[in-house]
């Protein structure tokens, strides 16, 4: 495992174009979070303008992260994303931990949250899915449907990157068009009230300053979960045509588009319903649609949301296995993860493993628990990856950098400062999920130690 960077992975030979790389980011990012988490923020914070400001801050942080990944990805355009960056910055231990955590918290858990929410939204058309009665023991039929969707997506993407990308491109185009349609319809004839944006709940008025900071950090963790995926195209860098040029462009364009759509959607939510009406609502998109458009509008929005969620799950199904593939290339004990399809050249074993882990998570957790767990874990490793920009500038000043981070070093330092503040306050507010995230990291370290010792 002492090979040099240039020997660690095959050179980029892909033919994916800018549109596909950008649509992958949009597809991954716009998933379950934006259609569910605003209700949790409304309950814990209770101030629409603060919530909107946090969504803007989250977008700004994601853009700062995208700038840093643009530099790293252009300099190291290989499959695996931050796994490669952390390996070159901090060594194999941290890189392995990142890859292991990506399997559980980076991709499998978010896919699980997306598909569980997909089935909840499907309940608008099939009310029996909303009931709480368990089937097959203690597991609800909703979860079995979600597991079935996992394996449908696995089957689609086992056909290869080209077939999977065409599917993603088409469904992402519909996703963006439907969201823009919702925003235009709400502004044009939606029965909302601008006064809702200024309405503050009693919950906010009762918060002391420490509680306010905790609520804001808790909300920001949800928001960073919603923005997670702004680095998606970095995972398939080796499959992008001319990645040194197109990868940075896709990262910045995709993140910018998502930020605009997210702020627009949240303004629409609060235009349709006040903060008390949205508080603790999982299907926050449907609640706002019901106020804005009535029953027919809810049906149309439900269809759009189902497509959006399916698109996100599909895109993450593509991106995740590239990380485990990169890990398998480096560690003999996990070499089976680097095995690819002879016909389509996709990482088939990694894809199937992700499907198994996703299925287990679907059967074992609630959407809000999964979001908190994922948000803490992703924020932790995103901090390490972004810090790689600084580390490599110092350790490898002669590394070829076709793209350099705008505003360096302020850009990575801003990302790191706010993210670390969020982690600290979130640990205080949600210790169970945060501790579970840290235990996952510790488990990754233990597995690395045992496999390395055995090797």
Image (spheres, helix red, strand yellow):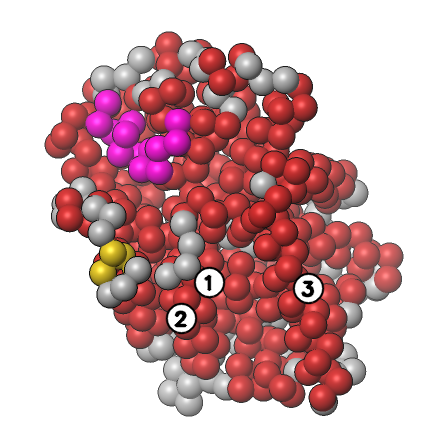
Callout 3: 10 Å neighbours few (<14), some, many (20+)? some
Callout 1 secondary element: helix
Task: Provide residue 196's location: percent of width, then percent of height.
Answer: 37, 14
Would residue 188 appear left or right of 217 to someone viewing this image? left
Disc 2 or 3, which lies upstream in sequence?
2
Instruction: Name the residue: 40% across, 20% down.
Output: 275
Disc 2 and disc 3: Cα gap in Å?
Answer: 23 Å
Q: Nearer the viewer, residue 128 or 225?
A: 128
Q: Nearer the viewer, residue 258 or 49?
A: 49
Mark 2 near mark 3, Cβ–Cβ under 8 Å? Answer: no
The label nearer to you, 1 versus 3, is: 3
Q: Quadrant of the N terminus?
A: bottom right
Q: Residue at coordinates 67% horizontally, 24% vertically from top-left?
A: 210
Q: Nearer the viewer, mark 2 or mark 3?
A: 3
Dot 2 surroundings within 10 Å: few (below 14), some, or many (20 or more)?
A: many
- Mark 2 in CB contact with mark 1 (< 8 angstroms): no
Which residue in the structure is indicated by mark 3? 442
Please state if 156 lies on the left or on the right of 434 as rendered.
Answer: left
Task: Kindly identify which residue carries mark 2.
Answer: 355
How much space separates mark 1 and mark 3, taking CA atoms?
18 Å
**Measured from the top left, where is residue 316 in percent x and y?**
44, 60
Image mark for residue 258: none
Q: Earlier in the sequence, mark 1 or mark 3?
A: 1
Residue at x 66% of width, y 75% of height = 447
Looking at the picture, does residue 148 appear above or below residue 353? above
Q: CA distance from mark 2 to mark 1?
A: 7 Å
Bounds of the magenta segment: 279-291
């Amino acid at each position: 495992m002492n090979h040099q960077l240039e020997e660690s992975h095959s050179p980029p030979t892909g033919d994916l174009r800018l549109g596909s790389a950008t649509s992958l980011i949009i597809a991954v990012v716009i998933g379950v979070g934006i259609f569910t988490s605003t209700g949790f923020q409304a309950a814990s914070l209770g101030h629409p303008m603060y919530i909107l400001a946090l969504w803007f801050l989250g977008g700004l942080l994601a853009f700062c992260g995208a700038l840093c990944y643009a530099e790293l990805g252009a300099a190291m355009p290989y499959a695996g994303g931050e796994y490669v960056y952390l390996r070159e910055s901090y060594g194999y231990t941290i890189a392995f931990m990142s890859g292991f955590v990506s399997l559980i918290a980076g991709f499998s858990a978010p896919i699980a949250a997306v598909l569980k929410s997909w089935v909840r939204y499907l309940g608008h058309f099939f009310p029996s899915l909303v009931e709480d009665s368990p089937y097959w023991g203690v597991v609800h039929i909703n979860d079995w449907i979600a597991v079935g969707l996992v394996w449908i997506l696995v089957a689609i993407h086992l056909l290869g990157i080209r077939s999977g990308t065409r599917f993603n491109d088409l469904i992402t185009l519909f996703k963006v068009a439907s969201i823009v349609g919702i925003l235009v319809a709400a502004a044009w004839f939606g029965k909302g009230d601008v006064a809702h944006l200024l309405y503050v709940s009693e919950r906010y008025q009762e918060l002391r300053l420490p509680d306010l900071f905790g609520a804001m950090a808790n909300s920001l963790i949800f928001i960073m979960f919603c923005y997670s995926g702004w680095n998606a195209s970095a995972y398939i860098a080796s499959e992008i045509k001319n990645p040194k040029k197109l990868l940075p462009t896709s990262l910045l364009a995709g993140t910018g588009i998502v930020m605009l759509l997210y702020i627009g959607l949240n303004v629409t939510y609060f235009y349709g319903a006040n903060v008390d009406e949205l508080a603790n609502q999982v299907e926050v998109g449907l609640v706002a649609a019901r106020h804005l458009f009535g029953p027919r509008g809810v049906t149309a929005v439900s269809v759009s949301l189902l497509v959006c969620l399916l698109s996100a799950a599909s895109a993450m199904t593509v991106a995740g296995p590239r990380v485990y593939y990169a890990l398998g290339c480096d560690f003999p004990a996990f070499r089976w993860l680097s095995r690819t399809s002879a016909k389509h050249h996709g990482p088939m074993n990694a894809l199937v493993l992700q499907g198994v882990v996703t299925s287990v998570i679907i059967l074992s957790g609630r959407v809000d628990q999964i979001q908190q767990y994922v948000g803490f874990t992703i924020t932790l490793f995103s901090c390490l990856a972004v810090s790689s920009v600084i580390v490599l500038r110092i350790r490898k000043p002669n590394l070829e950098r076709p793209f350099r981070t705008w505003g360096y070093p302020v850009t990575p330092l801003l990302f790191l400062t706010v993210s670390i503040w969020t982690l600290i306050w979130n640990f205080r507010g949600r210790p169970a999920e945060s501790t579970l995230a840290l235990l996952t990291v510790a488990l990754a370290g233990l597995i690395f130690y045992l496999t390395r010792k055995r090797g």
